[in-house]
Image: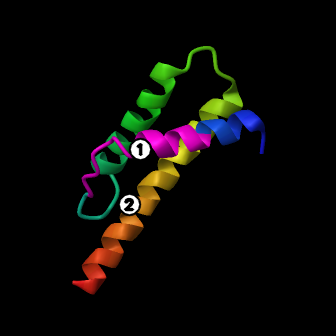
Amino acid sequence: MTTDYGIGWRRAQLAAQGVGFEPTPHLDGDGYTKFVQQTMDLVLQQNEDVSEDFITGVGEGAVAAWERHVHKESDHDYRG
């Protein structure tokens, strides 16, 4: 993992905290797409002239943040 990738991944995790999470019935589709896109947009708007590794880190960090939200929601639903 490169430094740029790691920085991008961490920045996506931070940005995701400010993005609304709206799970879809099957936890995919529009909710997923909007969440990942909004997270990436937040990070990339604040960082110009970035490397490909940074952008990859941002994308994978945004997906990881979505998966964390999905996991929390499924744990919450299971516990009732």
Of callouts 1 and 2, the N-terminal one: 1
Q: x, y percentage for residue 25?
A: 23, 63
Residues 38 and 14: in front is: 14
Tell me the crowding category of disc 1: few under 14, some 14 to 19, or many 20 or more residues within 10 angstroms, Cα based: many
Q: Which residue lies furthest to the bottom in this view?
A: 79
| Mark pair 1, 2: CA separation | 10 Å
Seen from the viewer's position, the closer of residues 7 and 64 is 7
Residue type at mark 1 is Ala
- The residue wearing badge 1 is 16
Secondary structure of the residue carrying tag 2 is: helix
What amino acid is labelled 2 in the image?
His
Q: Quadrant of the C terminus?
A: bottom left
Q: Nearer the viewer, residue 36 or 68?
A: 68
Residue 12 at x, y percent in the picture: 51, 40
Discs 1, 2 touching: Cβ within 8 Å = yes
Residue at horizontal 46%, vertical 53%? 65
Q: In this view, does 1 lie to the left or right of 51?
A: right
The disc label shown at residue 69, or none: 2
The residue positioned farthest toward the right in the image shown = 2
> Magenta stretch?
9-23
How many circles with numbers are drawn on the protein? 2
Q: Is residue 51 above or below residue 72?
A: above
Q: Which residue sits at x=36%, y=49%? A: 32
